[in-house]
Image: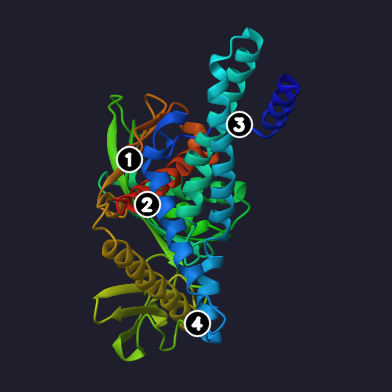
Amino acid sequence: MLRLAFRTRHRVFQQNAPITHRRRVVSDSVDGANFDNSPLVRLIQKRMQHRQEIESQIKDDTSPDDRQKFMKALSETDTLFMEWQEWQRTRELLNETRAMLQDPDPSMQAMAQEEYTTLNEKLNASLETTFPKLLVPASEDTSKLSAYIELKAGVGGSEATLFVDDLMRMYLRLALSMNWTASVVSSSEVDGGGFRDAILEIRGLNAYDTLRWESGVHRVQRVPATETKGRTHTSTVAVIVLPISEDEAAAETNNELYSMADIRIEVMRSRGAGGQHVNKTESAVRLTHIPTGITVSMQDERSQHQNRRRAFRILQARLLDRKLTQDVIDRRDARRDLVKSADRSEKIRTYNYAQNRVTDHRLGLSVKNITAVMEGEALKDILDGLVRQHEANLLESVLADVD
């Protein structure tokens, strides 16, 4: 009878046991005997204790406003509470199974060992995936934001401008594979091909949260087409990813990011290619946000009104980016490396054409297929790794509060 019950229970957990291939976020697997020593478990225990304290404050004479406040606080931990209850049930089964590991019957002992392994894996899966996602939920403030990508040629002369063109195509192809919409908002083409700078607009769910880690210096090492001696040249492009506010209609009005009284607006004649029009019409617009010194110039459109509208959108994006970055800095006390990921002067990636290799220096990851990265497909793997690294850093910041 005991064996039959054991086999039945074993089949249930065998079917429900999760299969995980994800990178470990917190630490290596924890053995069942040491689960209580896990900082993550101790943190959840603190959250559950706080939940009980809230529940104890809800009484028959609690005012409607206080009751609503308490119920809202409880609802925020409902999912974690249910997962924690499942965790505790699994822990009880694990303890029962541990007692059977010394059974004198070899077949019973083998079944006990198999179930013990399955239950242990289930608990570790909760530690590695389920609990971290519940403790560090996706930011509602940024998950719906789209993104501007600014690219500026750095050192390397014409090779840097050509690499701006390559990166533009890489991001446009990535957007296509992610089912985002993408367009070129502004670009400054140079003689001989390539671009001195460009701005892309990428719209879609999680576009900003996914692309924000592209901000930084991208370095390319390759032999230019004009190089007669086959020497490898090193060039750089600076990439800045900016969030697009959902309320773009308010870009030219007072809003929480700035007051129109702080904006200096200048109009001028466009410069560069464009025929006689650029010399006769004051269509170019330059905006300066006086408190921060942020300047935006726009001259791509023939209409001053269109250039003005685009310039305000870019200014709003830069100020929103400044606000989000400051929010990160304000929370950096526990984990200073969160700010490092937003350092636009840092070399973040190297594209080595001679060795057919792309190396992301933050992850310590090398992809030996540069074509796949430039086509956007392998770039998704790098971006996924950066998102996971960010989540791990956030979780470690949360765990720093555990006694």
- Judge the density around disc 2: few (<14), some (14-19), many (≥20) Cα neighbours within 10 Å: many
In the picture, measured across the screen, residue 116 lies left or right of residue 261, that is right
Residue tagged by mark 3? 19
Counting from the top left corner in percent of width and height, residue 7 is at 72, 23
Dot in front, 2 or 4: 4
Three-letter code for the amino acid on which mark 3 is drawn? Ile
Q: Are marks 1 and 2 in contact (CB under 8 Å)?
A: no
Q: Are marks 4 and 1 in contact (CB under 8 Å)?
A: no
68 or 167: nearer the viewer: 68
Looking at the image, is mark 3 or mark 2 earlier in the sequence? 3
Is label 2 in a helix, a strand or a loop? helix
Looking at the image, is mark 4 or mark 3 earlier in the sequence? 3
Residue tagged by mark 4? 66
Query: Marks 4 and 1, how far apart in space?
Result: 46 Å
Residue at the image point whose x is 55% and y is 79% from the top: 68
Dot in front, 4 or 3: 4
Query: Marks 3 and 1, how far apart in space?
Result: 28 Å
Residue tagged by mark 2? 394
Looking at the image, is mark 2 or mark 4 earlier in the sequence? 4
- Judge the density around disc 4: few (<14), some (14-19), many (≥20) Cα neighbours within 10 Å: few
Counting from the top left corner in percent of width and height, residue 57 is at 48, 74
Dot in front, 1 or 2: 2
Q: Is residue 259 above or below residue 325?
A: below
Query: Marks 1 and 2, how far apart in space?
Result: 16 Å
Q: Which mark is residue 362?
A: 1
- Judge the density around disc 3: few (<14), some (14-19), many (≥20) Cα neighbours within 10 Å: few
